[in-house]
Amino acid sequence: MKAGTVTTSIAAAVVVAVGLSGCTAGASVGKQAVDSAESLVATLAKASDDASKAGSAKVEMRLTMPGTGGKPVQVNGIYSWGDGLAMEAEMPAESLRLEDLVSDGTVTYRLVQGAYYYGIDPAPSGPFAGKTWLKVEASAVLGEQGAAGMNAGNSDPTAALKSLKWAENVTRVGREDVNGKSSVHYRAIVPVDRLGDTKALLAAVGGGGATELVSDIWVDDTGMPSRLNQTFGDSDVRMDFLSFGVAKDIVAPPAADTADVTEAIKKGGAAQG
């Protein structure tokens, strides 16, 4: 497993973990823009608050970005954000370039306290001998500023909805069915200069040349988000919220079972098993 391919893969995984919006710069918008979209933003703000209070969610995601070779990658898992952002999910090993390290074609990974853990089959020899997890600090991929944006305290799957108060254009597209739920489809556009520290995170995953973040949000009849789709340049993430309030304690694997390859990736060397 070469560090370059791991870097690309983790960058894609980080986008999944925090969405494309993260936090916003907090800039003000003109009164006319606020007034014209006031009722729409209020609806989305309530959906954001209610979803955020749930503390966790079961999700299905599909992401497409330069790091995935332009092919959609499916990721299914659980987010938890009550005591800091955490996640446990599964995705195809081929999408992560880890197919040589697992036998069943699927990788389980966890995000815990700013570090990623990738489940692998125990190797009989070499630097990964007996290890069942690889650890990589997010800062090794995103840099300190990008990692700080990921951990900015507003980085849960509902953060995109919070950012919409800075949108210059919010519209109601219409009513659609999402996973059997009748939902209202909204669209909002946020200029890149209002994305604050998140710009560093976006640049790290191949969206640095874009000028705006386009968010499509579906809200079901209970007032909860049922789908979020965000596009920033060549990067696109779709997240379906299947249920909220899913209790799951996501913890870091035991240190004895973990091989830390963070420094190898920072140095651009090979992390091979």
Image (cartoon, rainbow, N blue to C red):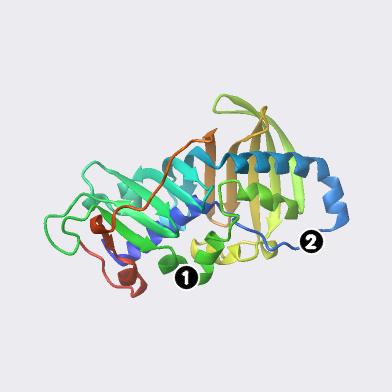
Picture layout, residue 167 above or below residue 49? below
Q: Residue at x 56, y 67 (%)?
A: 200
Q: Amino acid at mark 1?
A: Gly
Q: Amino acid at mark 2?
A: Ser
Tell me how far mark 1 sits from mark 2, CA to CA: 28 Å
Q: Residue at x 28, y 64 (%)?
A: 2
Left or right, 5 with respect to 25, comes to left
Q: Residue at x 77, y 42 (%)?
A: 42
Q: Nearer the viewer, residue 265 or 127?
A: 127
Picture quarter with the N terminus: bottom left
Q: Could you classify mark 2 by the number of other residues whose Cα lies within 10 Å: few (under 14), some (14-19), or many (20 or more)?
A: few
Please give the residue where the numbered disc 1 appears in the rendered image.
143
Residue 28: mark = 2
Residue 163: mark = none
Q: Could you classify mark 1 by the number of other residues whose Cα lies within 10 Å: few (under 14), some (14-19), or many (20 or more)?
A: some
Left or right, 190 with respect to 89, comes to right
